Image: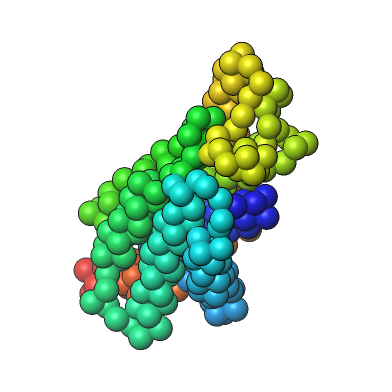
């Protein structure tokens, strides 16, 4: 693990969460009564879905790199070594999830409904929750523990949307947590893998791993306690800032129609659109 890995995760999660947040708010504002959550908000023309196809390439590369690190790691910390293998499993699960989404959309396989995709997504986030922070203890483990908690929230949101996709507030929470995961994973990378942002009185995690330890070493217990308090404070600040920005985005899109994204495509949206047309033409039929 390195700062570059965390920065890449930050870019992927943050952009994915913001994109989903904008699209779900736009679809909800168009007609709240007909809102249905989608596993992926496809856009026309197809080049606008470049983020999805990029992930289909990036995730396998990341998965194989973690397997390579597992095989090449020569440290004495066996548990930390196997954490690379666990992380590769998590990444592979999400890659399979994206493949299912693309196959369903490309071949119009209506048998694969969004509920099944959300259910599998819940399983993927559940696996991430169980695997997150394995191999680390102490302050470093606590930092990754917050990522595990966010993954648990995402798993619950996916299962709720699988049962009832019309729950906009659940989709909103899911997208907000994705953004929060992105900002927090960058914060973890800065605190654990850089000397410049390391906690006062504590070494970076890389120094500890070089000494065969799987923890952030602090000179005094007071430094460790202060580091824990600062970590929790930073996490609360991340939550508040992301929530305020998300509600601000909702208010901005609600106020300015020009800033709303274009129509998204896909079987489910087409189905919802046809329902909306039939409802709008109903008074004309009654008049005739």
Q: Which of 272/67 is in front?
A: 67
Q: Which of 192/95 is in front?
A: 192
Q: Residue at x 35, y 78 (%)?
A: 104
Q: Position of residue 30 (x, y in %)?
A: 45, 57
Residue 28 location, quadrant:
bottom left
Q: Which of 171/55 is in front?
A: 55
Q: Position of residue 54 (x, y in %)?
A: 57, 72
Q: Residue at x 53, y 39 (%)?
A: 214
Q: Position of residue 233 (x, y in %)?
A: 58, 24
Q: Residue at x 54, y 67 (%)?
A: 68
Image quarter in which the C terminus is found: bottom left
Q: Would residue 18 be seen by someone viewing this image from the given angle?
A: no
In the picture, measured across the screen, residue 284 lies left or right of residue 55, that is: left
- Establish if 9 lies above or below 271: above
Residue 248 location, quadrant:
top right
Q: Which of 128/251 is in front?
A: 128
Count the marks: 0
Q: Residue at x 61, y 13 (%)?
A: 222
Q: Position of residue 53 (x, y in %)?
A: 54, 75
């Amino acid at each position: 693990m390195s700062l570059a890995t965390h920065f890449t995760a930050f870019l992927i999660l943050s952009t994915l969460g913001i994109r989903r947040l904008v699209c779900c708010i736009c679809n909800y504002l168009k007609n709240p009564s007909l809102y249905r959550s989608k596993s992926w908000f496809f856009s026309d023309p197809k080049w606008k879905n470049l983020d999805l196809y990029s992930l289909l390439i990036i995730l396998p590369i990341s998965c194989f790199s973690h397997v390579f690190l597992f095989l090449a790691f020569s440290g004495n910390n066996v548990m930390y070594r196997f954490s690379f293998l666990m992380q590769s499993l998590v990444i592979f699960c999400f890659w399979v999830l994206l493949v299912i989404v693309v196959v369903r959309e490309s071949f119009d396989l209506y048998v694969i409904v969004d509920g099944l995709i959300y259910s599998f997504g819940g399983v993927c986030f559940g696996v991430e929750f169980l695997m997150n922070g394995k191999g680390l203890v102490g302050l470093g483990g606590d930092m990754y523990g917050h990522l595990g908690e966010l993954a648990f929230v995402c798993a619950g949101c996916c299962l709720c949307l699988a049962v009832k996709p019309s729950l906009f507030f659940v989709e909103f929470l899911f997208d907000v947590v994705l953004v929060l995961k992105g900002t927090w994973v960058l914060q973890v990378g800065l605190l654990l893998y850089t000397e410049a942002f390391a906690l006062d009185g504590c070494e970076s995690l890389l120094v500890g791993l070089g000494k065969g330890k799987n923890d952030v070493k602090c000179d005094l217990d007071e430094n460790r306690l202060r580091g824990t308090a600062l970590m929790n404070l930073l996490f609360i600040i991340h939550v508040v800032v992301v929530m305020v920005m998300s509600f601000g985005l909702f208010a901005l899109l609600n106020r300015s129609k020009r800033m709303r994204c274009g129509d998204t495509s896909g079987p489910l949206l087409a189905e919802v659109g046809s329902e909306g047309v039939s409802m709008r033409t109903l008074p004309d039929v009654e008049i005739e």
